[in-house]
Image: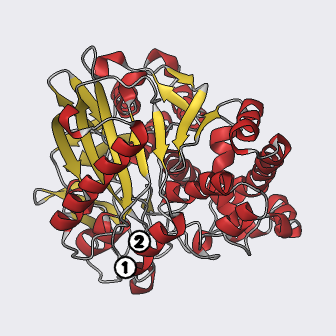
Amino acid sequence: MKKTVNIVGAGIAGLATAIRLAARDYRVTVFERSNVPGGKLGSIPWEGFRWDTGPSLFTLPDLVEELFLLAGTEMKTFIRYQKLDLITRYFYEDGKILNAYGDPQLFAEEAERVMGEPAGNVRKYLDHSREIYELTSDIFIFNRFFRMGTFLSQKFLKAFLRAWKLDSMVTMHDANARRFRSPHLVQLFDRYATYNGSDPYRAPGTLNIISHLEHNLGAFFPEQGMYSLALGMKEVADQMGVVFHFNQPVEKVAMQRREASGVVVNGEIHPSDLVVSDMDIFYLYRDLLEDGAFPVKHFRKERSTSALIFYWAIDAEFPGLELHNILFSDDYREEFRYLRNKKAIYRDPTVYLFISSKMVRGDAPAGKENWYVMINVPENLGQDWDSLIEQSRKNILNKMGRILGTEIEPLILKEFVADPRTIEATTSSHRGSLYGNSSNSRTAAFSRHPNFLRKYRGLYFVGGSVHPGGGIPLCLASAKIVDQQIT
């Protein structure tokens, strides 16, 4: 008789877990509170426009390819993607524009041409980030980190003996500042702290491995946009016999003597041998577990940042913009000081502009573009968000007009807005934080919530609020770790 598993949530980690366990002949049922799969990976349509609503950069595609191979098929049957020749175009307040090419050598040469930074410095930096990744990834990202066997492995010993190379005792900013002459390049690489909602002036330099994923391994983009990842994974899960129940929020995890025995939906128990939760760990403890064992110490830790996102239908095309664009703040340190100390938004925030219609022509009508305009903001602590949003919108429009040389507001045909309140409401992310707890300490990687606990037998945890962290690659890694743990 097949073993059964109930999965709470159809986010990217829940979908990956469903595929993995179905491939092992489990009978898999997924309960999702929303009416669509994907979690933070969503989509907004409007009169010929379409916006991806969540993650917008695709790295480590092998993690997705692996899921389709486990299902006995190929990813290209469901999702096609391509490597980006130009990853990001960076705009600085002094008028400099830097193209971050996908080829590391071209990128290094561009940095030398535009910023005067010796190309060799950039190559050495990327080689160093590769070395950190190779020393740490199998321990901290793709492994059951909380097992004693991890610390007794040859890989851990190798990393331990080379700990001085990991930059764990300095901040990302300090590590970058000592490797580059150009403050523009320092700012560029400091930005990678925001990929998990952290602060480059406090997060450990080890996190500079993030740039390796993008610049050495490559950045990619699905031909039909980011949301096609969720749709493709859902389709292959359907073909494997996974059963999905949408608009069906789980009310409780049924427990018998501290062993998961199913889930409660609409007052009815759905029994199963195992339960996997792909929901924010805060709400799992608060709402779904009845024993009161709320890990207060864990939830007192600093939360990651949230986001303020404007989705604009633009009545024009901008040939000077790319798929991914960054308009940097005039004072990066001050921007993060506002986020950290004031829980507010700096007057000149760094703006991320993502235009999927540059690659997916069907995402906007001819002669128009779909703009996803995002800034980092603090988690929701009850701030006056309406006022913050109104002022930030003015600041963003002023900044864009100044840098792009065009007044943007008259071009906006339609606007949708996401802020920490709506992010929390729609994705059950505690306080609207995008990545669970922040990584703003040397011990953060060691203190994320594990993927399983001995006191809850048969209950497993995946997704961005647990080990190894947030973002598509790490969510997929959490599913792989749980797959390895389930015997």
Residue 445 x/y as whole percent:
60, 68
Q: Which residue is mark 1?
A: 342
**Residue at mark 1 to residue at mark 2: CA–CA distance:** 6 Å
How far from the left and from the top, in percent, is residue 361? 35, 16
Pick the front one: 354 or 300: 354
| Image colouring | secondary structure
Circle 1 packing at 10 Å, graded few (<14), some (14-19), many (20+), is: few
How many numbered marks are there?
2
Q: Amino acid at mark 1?
A: Lys
Residue 11 seen by the camera: no
- Pointer 1 and pointer 2: residues touching (CB < 8 Å)? yes
In the picture, residue 288 is in which quadrant?
bottom left
Q: Is residue 104 above or below residue 270?
A: above
Quarter where residue 29 is shown? top left
Residue 208 pos. (x, y %): 67, 57
Residue 21: x %, y % from top left: 46, 42
Using the image, determine if residue 21 lies above or below residue 342: above
Left or right: residue 114 versus residue 294 is: right
Q: Secondary structure at mark 1?
A: helix
Q: Which mark is residue 339?
A: 2
Q: Residue at x 79, y 56 (%)?
A: 135
* Residue at the farthest left position: 266
Say what amino acid the circle numbered 2 marks: Leu
